[in-house]
Image: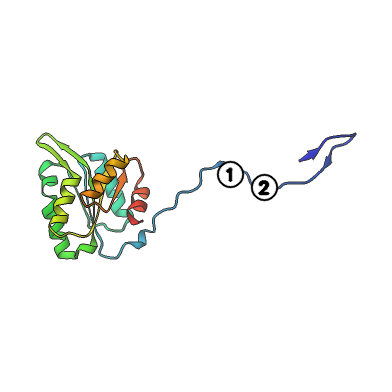
């Protein structure tokens, strides 16, 4: 900063700083994807093709390449309880992570992630279950938790955010 007065400008003090980092958005912390135990199996289900493509990137980032991405058809979504229970029996409940879309809509009907979650909890599954929904109002989040979900994931995030939220 310069003091301008009298006949010549004089330096009152000098402030040297890097402004650029102050103008940029702070970096979002990425998930510690190594926090997943080796052998963790992820089951994602969504009726939306683009969401299923995003899940492929998610399981790749989590280094869980042999995971399942389902929900292309009503029959796939309707069979989720059996698939999850079979994988949990083979791998152990603690090694299976589920991410279910809340509203999977098909010509044959709608399957809710909360319904699948409640059935899994009733059957004794105690692994992680996340409900992914665009509706993240507090009342709906309570509904997801009441059904037995471990947590809720917003649909507006990127793959890295999904992984971060799930691993919290």
Residue 168, quarter of picture:
bottom left
Q: Residues within 10 Å of mark 1 (few under 14, many from 20)?
A: few
Indicate the position of residue 48 as horizontal and vertical percent values. Answer: 22, 39
| Residue 53 visible to the viewer | no
Residue 94, quarter of picture:
bottom left
Q: Secondary structure at mark 1?
A: helix
Placement of 27 over or under 66, stated as above or below: above
Seen as rendered, the residue at the extreme right is 7
Color style of the picture: rainbow
| Residue 164 visible to the viewer | yes
The reply to whether discs 1 and 2 touch (Cβ–Cβ < 8 Å) is no
Indicate the position of residue 10 as horizontal and vertical percent values. Answer: 84, 41
Residue at screen point 11% across, 46% down? 78
Front-lying residue, 168 or 160: 168
Residue at screen point 29% across, 38% down? 135
Residue 5, quarter of picture:
top right
Q: CA distance from mark 1 to mark 2?
A: 10 Å
Front-lying residue, 149 or 65: 149
Q: How many labels were placed on the picture?
A: 2
Indicate which disc residue 17 carries.
2
Query: The N terminus appears in which quarter of the rendering?
Result: top right
In-image side of 21 versus 59 (left or right): right
Residue at screen point 11% across, 34% down? 107
Indicate the position of residue 122 as horizontal and vertical percent values. Answer: 13, 55
In-image side of 14 versus 43 (left or right): right
Q: Secondary structure at mark 2?
A: loop
Front-lying residue, 20 or 110: 110
Q: Residues within 10 Å of mark 2 (few under 14, many from 20)?
A: few
Indicate the position of residue 83 as horizontal and vertical percent values. Answer: 13, 54
Indicate which disc residue 22 carries.
1
Residue at screen point 48% across, 48% down? 27
Of the residues under marks 1 and 2, which one precedes in the sequence? 2
């Amino acid at each position: 900063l310069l003091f301008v007065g009298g006949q010549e400008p004089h330096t009152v003090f000098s402030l040297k700083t890097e402004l650029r980092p102050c103008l940029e958005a702070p970096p979002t912390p990425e998930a510690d994807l190594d926090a997943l135990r080796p052998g963790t199996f992820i089951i994602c289900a969504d009726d939306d093709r683009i969401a299923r493509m995003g899940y492929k990137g998610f399981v790749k980032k989590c280094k869980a390449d042999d995971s399942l991405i389902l929900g292309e058809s009503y029959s796939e979504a309707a069979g989720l309880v059996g698939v999850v229970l079979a994988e949990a029996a083979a791998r152990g409940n603690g090694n299976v992570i589920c991410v279910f879309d809340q509203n999977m809509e098909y010509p044959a009907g709608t399957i809710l992630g909360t319904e699948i979650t409640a059935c899994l909890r009733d059957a004794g599954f105690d692994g992680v279950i996340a409900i992914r929904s665009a509706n993240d109002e507090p009342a709906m989040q309570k509904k997801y938790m009441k059904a037995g979900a471990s947590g809720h994931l917003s649909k507006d995030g990127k793959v890295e955010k999904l992984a971060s939220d799930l691993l919290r």
